[in-house]
Amino acid sequence: MSKKEIILRPYQENIINETLAAVQFGSDNVVIDSPPGSGKSIIISKTAQELSKNGKVVFGRIGFGYFK
């Protein structure tokens, strides 16, 4: 089975770049908040892929509803 290249939308690239910059400047916790259907899973996957290249460990949490 061949791999398909995922082409990111410009706003997805912006979110990934902003997240990587935040981590580079010392943020330990980053929240990615985006509307339904915006490709959050792809954004998180690509961000984790980039961070893991630099030895970072990524944990994710998907929340449904509001935090109390």
Image (spheres, rainbow, N blue to C red):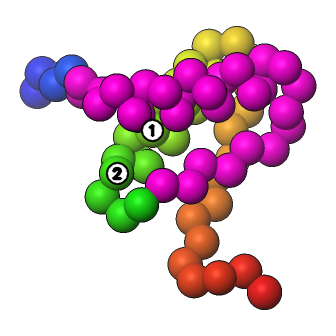
Query: Which of the two marks, 1 or 2, is nearer to us in this view?
Result: 2
**For mark 2, what is the residue?**
38
Q: Residue at x 24, y 27 (%)?
A: 6
Residue type, label 2:
Ser
Task: State if disc 2 and disc 1 touch (CB < 8 Å).
Answer: yes
Q: Residue at x 70, y 20 (%)?
A: 21
Number of labelled discs? 2
Secondary element at image label 1: helix
Q: Earlier in the sequence, mark 1 or mark 2?
A: 2
Question: Quadrant location of the C terminus?
Answer: bottom right
Q: Is residue 59 magenta?
A: no
Q: Position of residue 25 (x, y in %)?
A: 84, 20
Question: Quadrant location of the N terminus?
Answer: top left
Secondary element at image label 2: loop
Q: Give left or right: position of 42 versus 33.
A: left
Q: Position of residue 64 (x, y in %)?
A: 55, 78
Q: Farthest residue to the top: give it.
A: 54
Q: Which residues are magenta?
A: 6-34
Give the CA distance from mark 1 to mark 2.
Answer: 9 Å
- Residue 43: mark in rendering: 1
Q: Position of residue 63 (x, y in %)?
A: 60, 72
